[in-house]
Image (tube, grey):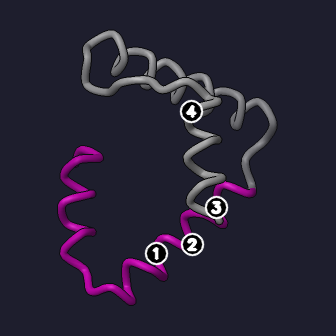
Amino acid sequence: MTIKQIEVQLLKLDTKSRALLAEKLLHSLDKLSDSENEQLWAEEALRRHQELIEGKVTSRDANEVLHDVRNALK
């Protein structure tokens, strides 16, 4: 079973069950070693970079993002 297939099945669960599962998954990440965390972040960075290259997402200047956040918090 692929991750996508698992995702499709899990999204069929009721809200409470999904929340409990999400909590368990998040707690499981706390048990990763430093090297495992570094590997996951590297993979995520590569995935995001590929999305930028393929035009699936766009980037924004950090100052612009912070400006928007500050305005939203006012």
Instruction: Check the image and report above or below for 37 versus 32.
Output: above
Asked if the residue at tag 2 contacts the one at tag 1, i.e. Cβ–Cβ closer than 8 Å, the answer is yes
Horizontally, residue 28 falls left or right of residue 44, namely right
The residue identified by callout 1 is 21
Residue at mark 3 to residue at mark 4: CA–CA distance: 34 Å
Out of 25 and 46, give the one closest to the viewer. 46
The residue identified by callout 2 is 24
The reply to whether the magenta stretch includes residue 3 is yes
Out of 35 and 74, give the one closest to the viewer. 74
Direction top: furthest residue: 53
The residue identified by callout 4 is 64
Residue at mark 1 to residue at mark 3: CA–CA distance: 11 Å
What kind of element bears circle 2?
helix
Which numbered disc, 3 or 4, marks the residue that appears first in the sequence?
Answer: 3
Q: Amino acid at mark 1?
A: Leu
Of the 4 image quadrants, the one containing the C terminus is bottom right
What kind of element bears circle 4?
helix
- Residue 48 % position (x, y): 44, 25
Residue at mark 4 to residue at mark 1: CA–CA distance: 35 Å
Asked if the residue at tag 4 contacts the one at tag 3, i.e. Cβ–Cβ closer than 8 Å, the answer is no
Horizontally, residue 73 falls left or right of residue 59, namely right
- Answer few, some or many: residues within 10 Å of disc 2's Cα (few below 14, many 20 plus, some between 14 and 19): few
What kind of element bears circle 3?
helix
Q: Amino acid at mark 2?
A: Lys
The residue identified by callout 3 is 28
- Answer few, some or many: residues within 10 Å of disc 4's Cα (few below 14, many 20 plus, some between 14 and 19): few
Residue that appears at 71% across and 29% down? 38
